[in-house]
Image (tube, rainbow, N blue to C red):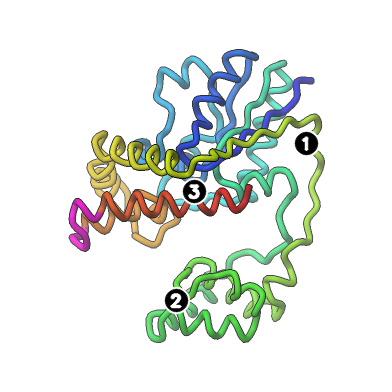
Amino acid sequence: MPPIVLLMGPTASGKSALALALAEAFGGEIVSVDSAQVYRGMDVGTAKPDAATRANVPHHLIDVVDPTQSYSAARFAADARAAIADIRARGRLPVVAGGTMLYFRALTEGLSDLPAADPGVRAEIDAEAALRGWPALHAELARLDPATAARLAPTDSQRIQRALEVVRATGTPLSALQGRRSTAPLGDVVSLALVPGDRARLHEAIARRFDAMLAAGLVEELAALRGRFALRADLPSMRCVGYRQAWRFLDGEIARGELRATGIAATRQLAKRQFTWL
């Protein structure tokens, strides 16, 4: 059986080009590890491969769900394993490439055994946040689960909400439940990571790519999506880098120049988090 290539790296490091070159050279197919490319219609802001590229080299786990839907790391792990098995069964090389490091962990190490989302508890937490603010809920989390609170910013609403939801629903801190993982081995794996040594050049590449997205119609793409789907700013798809800033621009909260500045800054922060994972 062909091995499995895992290709990781921060945004704008050249993963897509290398994945394509590997697939072309060794008769492979690409499995996308990108939590934004799973959404249909979100093409410009996620730098999806174009139709010609996808016709030349098959890509998997792109355009999986509508932007109104959620897509979890657990579902990715199951979908990726199915895609990898199918590719290998045909004697092809799976090139599993992307920058969503949680997805890589879910695939290779499995996920912690955590409770499912509880809409009722989440609604209560959201209502409290509207009254007291997320920093106050972060302070509450620090009392209930200091280990988790210590690694979260007081404004990280999504993760604070999940941590409070877990401790309220189970009586057990999230930090105590995490780390209990089990998963079947993938088999013969070759792991590669692109880790640019020159951060300044990476930052320049990030700025060029964000400018290219704006020129290609990121704002117009989001406006069309808002007309097509019942979107909200708090949906996982709309919290993706680029779309979050474009949403604020369309709502008149920021000007065009600030859209560019905040989008580039958010992308640089994303790259920093990816470096930390690597």
* Lower sequence index among marks 2 and 1: 2
Tell me the chief SS of the magenta region.
loop
- Which corner quadrant of the image does residue 171 belong to? bottom right
Inter-mark Cα distance, 1 to 3: 27 Å
User: For the residue marked with disc 1, what is the amino acid?
Assistant: Leu
Q: Which residue is mark 2?
A: 126
Q: Quadrant of the N terminus?
A: top right
Instruction: Provide the residue designation for mark 3.
Output: 271
Q: Magenta stretch?
A: 251-258
Q: Residues within 10 Å of mark 2 (few under 14, many from 20)?
A: some
* Helix, strand or loop under label 2: helix
Residue 73, position as x, y percentages in the image: 61, 50
Neighbour class for label 1 at 10 Å: few (<14), some, many (≥20)? some
x, y percent for residue 218: 28, 41
Horizontal placement of 123 versus 108: left or right? left
The location of residue 202, given as percent across then percent down, is 44, 40
Task: Give the residue type that dot 3 points to.
Answer: Ala
Instruction: Determine the secondary structure under disc 3.
Output: helix
